[in-house]
Amino acid sequence: MGRYLWVAVLLLGFVPGVVRSTQTPDQPRFTQSVLATGLEHPWEVAWGPDGYLWVSERTGKRISRVNPVDGSTNVAVEIPEAFQSIAQDGVLGLALHPRLLQGTGEDYVYVALTYQEQGSPRLKVRRFSYDQDTRVLMAPVDVIASLPAHDDHLGGRLAIGPDDKLYLGIGDQGGNWLQNYCNPNKAQDLPVAADIEARDWATYEGKVLRLDLDGSIPSDNPSINGVRSHIWSYGHRNPQGLVFGRDGSLYASEHGPSTDDELNLIEPGGNYGWPWVAGYRDDQSYAYFNWSASRPEACGTLTFSTSETPASVPRAMESGWSHPDFKPPLQTLFTVPNDQDFRAQGGGTIAPSSLGIYTVRDGGIPGWADSLLVPGMIKGRMYRQALSADGRSAVGDPVELFRTANRYRDLAISPDGRTIYIATDNTGRTTGRDDEMTQELEHPGAIIQFTYDDE
């Protein structure tokens, strides 16, 4: 049974040699510097049309603007009613309307945040209007509320597509895992028509949603099992990265259990396999142990373990599951072999916290055009994954960059493509420069900038 152990990456960490990324001497050189400090768990950073970096602060419960010239910061709005109690909730995703400050009257900023509803945490999306004269966000309007939220795997990344639709990643709420091991995993569950009529979004766990800007269901969303809802894709574990390519393709990064973080091309109606499949459907170092279905011993009588699973807990191999709409990942970060000793070696995941895409050609970093950029939390690294010309497949292995002792949370790219801005967590564990696990972070609650040096 050891070859199928589920070992929490946050519990066991990593050792050298597990990850197959490459970093060669001919990689571009960068100058590293700290742009801003004193941020409270910055969660999303986006380049705005005003030439500022817009930042959501998860525990700070606010949206701030950072001057990329001198690092000075001003608060655009405080959101004190945001509910923040664990390491994944608070003020989360941030999306700037594509016509912000373009004189069209659409000076809107969308924010995903957790709140309490009848004593339970929930997720909502709120729209603010930006006043350019006062530089504040005002006139909040909740476009959708009562979305799933819990104490693990919240997701919460928000993006606006070239189709003027909102896209929101929601995690599986940690079902069947750690403290939630007796909660059924709902990543494969789909709503029925009555759920949609009642505005019951309980089945939205483990999904990527697509919404009209007013929160309604787009008329061209896929009909899945005969029901049209906000669901764009499903079968996700914890999709915390969403980004659009030049042609409008949507990519997502997703946390794996202790192997197989995923880079996915998100397609309407696609089923990405979780919890039946982690990464590729290859029976490689993963099997689905469904604790909530334990019989005859009830789950509540069992003690959860990532290393020992009672015989009463059903086990399913990846190859034993199939679905006509299954979509394998473009790439994993990383798949480990079946003989991986998780106790001694740790896991293969980097805990991808978000996702960026590099599209600059003229004057940008040579060879980087059409690459996904993936920051890691449990490894203080960024990875660059080259894409094919049509953007539908990965080319080669991920390349490791920017090795530091930080937990990278999100990134933004300057319009000229020559500076990468990375926001860092204030606390937590990461694998440092020497591949040893540490909680001594180099630049907590900061924005670090890596500027391309072509001399």
Image (cartoon, rainbow, N blue to C red):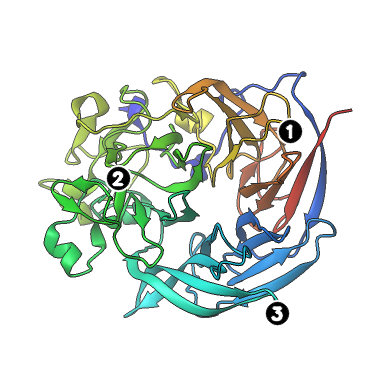
The label nearer to you, 2 versus 3, is 3
- How far apart marks 2 and 3 lie (CA) works out to 41 Å
Image position, residue 268 (x, y; %): 31, 42
Question: Mark 2 highlights which residue?
Answer: 234
Label 1 element class = loop
Q: Label 1 sits on what residue type? A: Gly
Q: Nearer the viewer, residue 339 or 352?
A: 352
Image label count: 3
Q: Quadrant of the N terminus?
A: top left
Question: Mark 3 highlights which residue?
Answer: 134
Question: Mark 1 highlights which residue?
Answer: 364
Q: Nearer the viewer, residue 10 or 134?
A: 134
Image position, residue 385 (x, y; %): 57, 28
Q: Label 2 sits on what residue type? A: Tyr
- How far apart marks 1 and 2 lie (CA) works out to 35 Å
Q: Nearer the viewer, residue 424 or 395?
A: 395
Q: Is residue 173 visible?
A: no
Q: Dots 1 and 2: beta carbons under 8 Å?
A: no
Image position, residue 60 (x, y; %): 62, 70
Q: Label 3 sits on what residue type? A: Thr
Q: Is residue 355 visible?
A: yes
- Mark 2 or mark 1, which is nearer the start of the sequence? 2
Q: Dots 2 and 3: beta carbons under 8 Å?
A: no
Point out which mark residue 201 bears. none
| Residue found farthest to the front | 104
The label nearer to you, 1 versus 2, is 1
Image position, residue 107 (x, y; %): 57, 69
